[in-house]
Amino acid sequence: MTDDYLKARKAGEKTYKEKVAEGEYPFLPALDDILPDADMLTHKPLGLMEIPVGMIAGTKTMARQNAFAPDFMPLLEPDSEFGTKWSSLYNAQISEGFSDPIKVYEYMHRFYVQEGNKRVSVSRYLDMPVIMADVTRIVPPAEVLAENPVYAEFLRFYDVAPIYEIETSWEYSYSELAELLDMDLVRKWPEETVKSLKNLYWIFTMAMESLGDKVPDLLTGDAFMVYLRIYINDGLRHYPQNIVEKRILRIKKELLIEHNKERVALVETPEEALGAGSIITMTESVVGKVIPVLSYSPKNPLKAAFIYDKSIDGSSRIADHEKGRIRLEKAYGGSVKTKCYENCNDSESFEAAADDAARWGADAVFTTSPGQINDALRAAIRYGGIEFLNCSINLPHQAVRSYYAKTYEAKFLAGIVAGTAASIDGTHKIGYCSDYPIYGTVAGINAFAIGAAMVDPEVRIYLEWETKRDTNWWWSMVDRGIRVISAVDSLHNADGSDAFGVCCVDKCEAGKGNDLSGTCDIKNLAVPVIKWGKLYEIIVKTMLDGSYHSRRVDKKDQATNYWWGMISGVVDVVLGDVVSPYTRRLVETFRNDIIEGRFNPFDAELRSQSGLIRGENDEPLSSLDVIRMDWLNENIIGEIPKLETIKEEEKATVKFSGVESTRK
């Protein structure tokens, strides 16, 4: 079989020359070079197993480095002892297979060969996917694991599901994989589940390789996670490779987004979204007039469905979206019809609602919680002719667009009102109740704290979270003597009390839970509001005038996220009657400055609880920096909660849209 050795050697020489030309090391990497103190680290025997040949990165020692190119193809002469042994091993593999396992060390998800380099070379030449090996893991020191959280999580995954093949580049992906399969990273997975997952990944890998240039050059494990999110309703059912290939092509745009370094494209004003092919002016579209449309009419209306995760009566947030839905339908004089579905808080109820909306003939489906994103994504792939949107920000999907409001602008103004009240009160204390630690929310907390400090430099913000387990945020604040409180951001509280927006509290008597009716004297000072009806009108307008998929909005390989604020008429603050005319004037001045683009609360020096974030003369924060904030301003007493502390029924929202620090 000398001819095969010559072919393998020719491939090795080609690789060698390419590496030399690129100024790179032209031989096999050696773990002893990479990790000189390997013998000082913990060695954990894992036993005999099949390992992916493609994950064998080099040799353990430097002794055999020069015999191979970096791809394990041989470099020595055919008539050498090395060449003869290589050819013998080739013959053995062709006739009966290797009889002995190789010996390897695994470090940071890669294997390095102690014994069996030539067998690996033959396996690479024959494109063998796996090889039997006796594996010993070299456990990285704690500081290395801290710098490589993906690998650290892989170790937890491997302990419960010993599969080396699935490699991802995203933090928390193994936790997500476990959750998708109703498993965790604590208890051993059933052997049948591990086997089925491994087989499904094998089929998926073959499908990706078969598609070649038709799909983006994405790490297979990352692509697999996208695939599972969409097709997890099939569980681990094994479809033929050709079916899997067709599915992969259907989600190609989702894969392209994951391949893109900056995955989210923000549309920050309605002017950016409107106008492509429009026959209607911007002014007409946002003042609530009945306006003409292109192909839609009362006889042929555009149909928009709204899928809520909670009931309208039981949630202030959903009640506000419902008002927006009603306003949307009224605004277009019969040319837009809407329909809503309540309590769709699991995949089964969501799918039933989406199916009914499709039968109804929906042109668009609005989903109003970040926790619904994966269900919306699956439905969007299934019903390709319907536009799906999700109320969230910074979620990277092309099949589902995201929309949210710049609430931090109104929160800043509410902070001014609260700071003034706390200064007059003399306590310099403000209680702040937030809902979810998700993208966009932390910016609102910080903007509020900055606004309060601008009128009362001594003020301190005491932060609580409505969605944390075992908490009674209201009485926690009242019992500490806090009389200025920022509560639920809605003009009407779902519990029927007056505890909403920024309010002053007096004469409190102990009540049950957060039911404040009759227990406190509450004066409402300011309420940040999101005008969901205005936002829905503008988005639907882009569908009516044909600009929804215009090039300036529908960016290639990026997810479109609408993020609108005061300048768009989507965000505002409502002041109570008890607010003094001086405070009103101050709020109005800043409000106008925000609308005119002259002021942003984050354009000055910024200091977090742990130190300087932005100097006075530094570059301003980008919009995505603001959205992704996971730090708290220096005058805030409190913390961003971890995911495990969130109430079970609220975890889905935080899992999909939680800021980075919720997961650390």
Image (cartoon, rainbow, N blue to C red):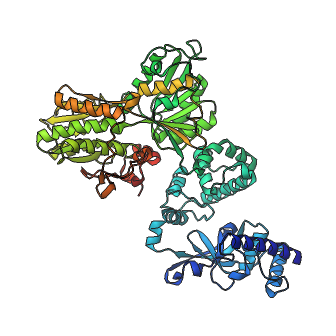
Image quarter of the N terminus: bottom right
* Numbered label tally: 0
**x, y percent for residue 554:** 58, 36
Between 196 and 126, the residue placed more toward the observer is 126
Between 50 and 147, the residue placed more toward the observer is 147
Q: Quadrant of residue 663?
A: bottom left
The residue under the point 37% across, 43% down is: 441
Q: Quadrant of residue 35?
A: bottom right
**x, y percent for residue 44:** 54, 77
Height in image: 13 above or below 391? below
The residue under the point 48% across, 26% down is: 538
- Looking at the image, residue 462 sits to the left or right of residue 151; the answer is left
**x, y percent for residue 132:** 70, 73
The residue under the point 33% across, 45% down is: 602
Between 135 and 641, the residue placed more toward the observer is 641
**x, y percent for residue 118:** 75, 79
The residue under the point 55% across, 35% down is: 553
State the residue lying farthest toward the bottom: 81
Q: Is residue 487 visible?
A: no
Q: Is residue 133 visible?
A: yes
Image quarter of the C terminus: bottom left
- Looking at the image, residue 471 sits to the left or right of residue 247; the answer is left
- Looking at the image, residue 439 sits to the left or right of residue 420; the answer is right
